[in-house]
Image (cartoon, grey):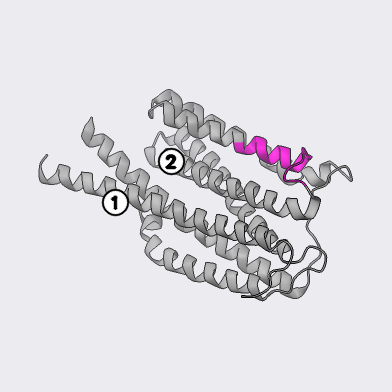
Amino acid sequence: MADLGSGGGYFLVAYALFLGGVAGYTIWLWTRLRQARGELERHRKSP
Amino acid sequence: MQDLFIRSAKIVGPLAAILLAYSLYCVYEVPREIQLGISQKIFYIHMGAIVPTYLGFILAAVGGIGFLVTRRDSWDRLAVSGAEIGIFFCSLLILVGMLWARPAWGVWWTWDLRLTATLILWFYYVAYLFLRAFAFGSDAARNLSAVMGIAGTLMIPFVYYSVQLAGLRTIHPPMPEMSAEMAHALNVNLVAYFVVFLYLLALRLDVGREEAALEELAV
């Protein structure tokens, strides 16, 4: 593994936070969208 | 118009993923800064998050004006979506800024004008989202949040120019001089984060539209 040198830990945490944050927020929105669409579908099938 | 934008997510999503991957590659390739070493590269996330933060908050104002003028729900959804995504990027901006500050300044946080003003901006829009969450979409809450969204943008120029306003009495650096490689990496990051912002906005608007349709069925 490449030598990150001093400050490497901060760098890795910052990128993990950023990528994890974007991925987490996207997944949360996908989940909400799927739930809303699922419920709408149920309403349409049995109003 | 909004429907067309929401549909564009199918193209914008993969594009955002490709650009994000390329931005990571650029950050990996760009030479390390001599004094701060690799932790200086946090700068690229920090700078990249600024534009989506301000854009999100400006959209909260645009949506607020649109809603007050037309009373159409689509404008209100645009305002809430903008504020929510703005808060998301503003949180990242502050957190990665702290991770940059610790090795650079020796402290996680200092009550510098830029930092304090950004934190106040963050609290302001958190209050905006709390108002929306606890008022259950009442008309009064939508009117008040529209006014809050419009008023909030008045803080953005102050936050942006706070380093210049503080003169030499600030620890937060202004935009540094950059080599061509650093400037390229920064530009790629700015474009990538902007496209990520567009994708998240399209997704959030879609969520708002579907949830509004569900609420109408429930009434």
Q: Chief secondary structure of the magenta span?
A: helix
Q: Is residue B75 visible?
A: yes
Q: Which residues are magenta?
A: B107-122
Chain containing mark 1: A
Residue A43, quarter of picture? top left
Find residue B75 and name its label: 2
Q: Residue at x 41, y 56 (%)?
A: B5
Q: Extreme right residue here?
A: B168
**Residue B99 at x, y percent in the picture:** 68, 52
* Residue B2 visible in the shown view: no
Q: Residues within 10 Å of mark 1 (few under 14, many from 20)?
A: some
**Is residue B111 found inside the magenta-colored segment of the image?**
yes
At label 2, which amino acid type do we have?
A: Trp
Q: For the residue labelled by badge 2, is the local secondary structure a helix, a strand or a loop?
A: helix
In the image, which disc is placed on residue B104?
Answer: none
User: Where is residue B81 drawn, in percent x and y?
Assistant: 46, 44
Q: Indicate which disc residue A34 carries.
A: 1
Tell me the SS state at disc 1: helix
Residue B191 placement, left or right of B130? right
Q: Chain of mark 2?
A: B
- Tell me: B100 left or right of B57: right
Label 2 and label 1: CA atoms lie apart by 23 Å
Q: Quadrant of the C terminus of chain B?
A: top left
- Nearer the camera: disc 2 or disc 1: 1
Q: Answer whether labels 2 and 1 touch (C-beta < 8 Å).
A: no
Which residue is farthest top?
Answer: B140
Q: Are marks 2 and 1 on the same chain?
A: no
Give whichever of B207, B41 is nearer the camera: B41
